[in-house]
């Protein structure tokens, strides 16, 4: 998707409806800065407000994602292209998130063991030693929460029994026995438990 083209299209349609950035932002319950970012191609509208935005601008979501009004002749072709672009962008985002997950895990482990090492080998008062260790564990637990949230939402888990791909709940990821990114969970489709691998593509 061409963000610059989409941004210019949003600006054009907004002006056609005689709205300022502030007026459009007020209608959508967002800041005019967000509208400005769309129109300059720095970001895309969030999926949660895309339908409402299209309604105010008098266009379809397909028009918006294409950056121009689509004729009926080209409708199916552009719709398919836009859907493929969205899927590709999600896959790229998921890959980046899974890389971030590794970085968070490594940094959290280094931070924890560094504080434990300092507490164990450097002379200090006992209360300070305990405070360092507790602080290290608190930071580690917070980091692991982010780690697990990324593990839950990035990509999909594939059931080894029926092949169904899905995004599990945070609770099922948290409680599941795991080896790396393979977790032993119950599939919501077939109801059977199996070792389910993390996959990027749906």
Image (cartoon, helix red, strand yellow):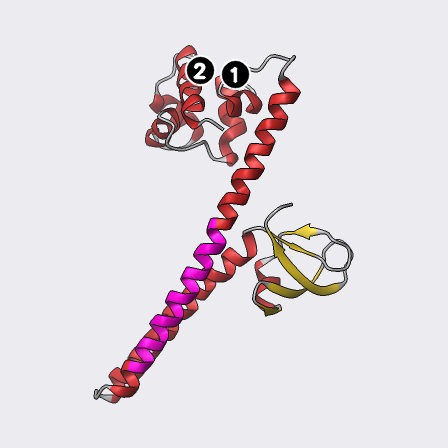
Q: In the rendered structure, does residue 110 fall within the stretch colored magenta?
A: yes
Give the main secondary structure of the magenta stretch. helix
Q: Which residues are magenta?
A: 96-117
Indicate the secondary structure of the residue bearing disc 2.
Answer: helix
Residue for point 56% across, 56% down: 152
Q: Residues within 10 Å of mark 1 (few under 14, many from 20)?
A: some
Q: Position of residue 190 (x, y in %)?
A: 78, 56
- Check disc 2 and report the residue beneath it: 13
In the drawing, what numbered circle is on residue 58? Answer: 1
Task: State the image quarter where residue 21 is shown.
Answer: top left
Callout 2–callout 1 Cβ contact below 8 Å: yes
Q: In the rendered structure, does residue 63 fall within the stretch colored magenta?
A: no
Q: Earlier in the sequence, mark 2 or mark 1?
A: 2
Rendered position, 133 above or below 4: below
Q: Position of residue 102 (x, y in %)?
A: 45, 61
Residue for point 51% across, 57% down: 149
Task: State the image quarter where residue 5 is shown.
Answer: top left
Residue for point 63% across, 27% down: 80
Q: In the rendered view, does 179 fall on the left or right side of 123?
A: right
Residue toward you, 24 or 119: 119
Q: In the rendered view, does 22 fall on the left or right side of 166?
A: left
Q: Position of residue 6 (x, y in %)?
A: 45, 23
Residue for point 29% across, 78% down: 132
Q: Position of residue 38 (x, y in %)?
A: 39, 28
Rendered position, 30 above or below 103: above
Indicate the secondary structure of the residue bearing disc 1.
Answer: loop
């Amino acid at each position: 998707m061409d963000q610059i083209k989409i941004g210019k299209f949003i600006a054009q349609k907004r002006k056609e409806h005689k709205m300022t950035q502030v007026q459009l932002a007020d209608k959508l319950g967002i800041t005019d800065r967000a509208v400005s970012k769309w129109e300059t191609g720095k970001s895309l509208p969030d999926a949660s407000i895309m339908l409402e935005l299209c309604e105010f601008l008098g266009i379809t979501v397909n028009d918006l994602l294409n950056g121009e009004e689509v004729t009926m002749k080209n409708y199916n072709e552009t719709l398919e292209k836009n859907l493929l672009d969205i899927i590709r962008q999600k896959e790229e985002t998921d890959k980046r998130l899974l890389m971030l997950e590794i970085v968070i895990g490594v940094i959290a482990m280094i931070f924890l063991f560094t504080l434990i090492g300092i507490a164990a080998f450097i002379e200090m008062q006992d209360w300070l030693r305990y405070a360092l260790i507790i602080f290290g564990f608190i930071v580690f637990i917070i980091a692991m929460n982010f780690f697990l949230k990324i593990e839950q939402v990035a990509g999909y888990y594939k059931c080894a029994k029926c092949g169904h791909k899905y995004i599990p709940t945070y609770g099922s990821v948290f409680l599941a026995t795991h080896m790396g990114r393979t977790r032993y969970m119950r599939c919501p489709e077939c109801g059977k438990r199996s070792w389910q691998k993390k996959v990027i593509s749906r």
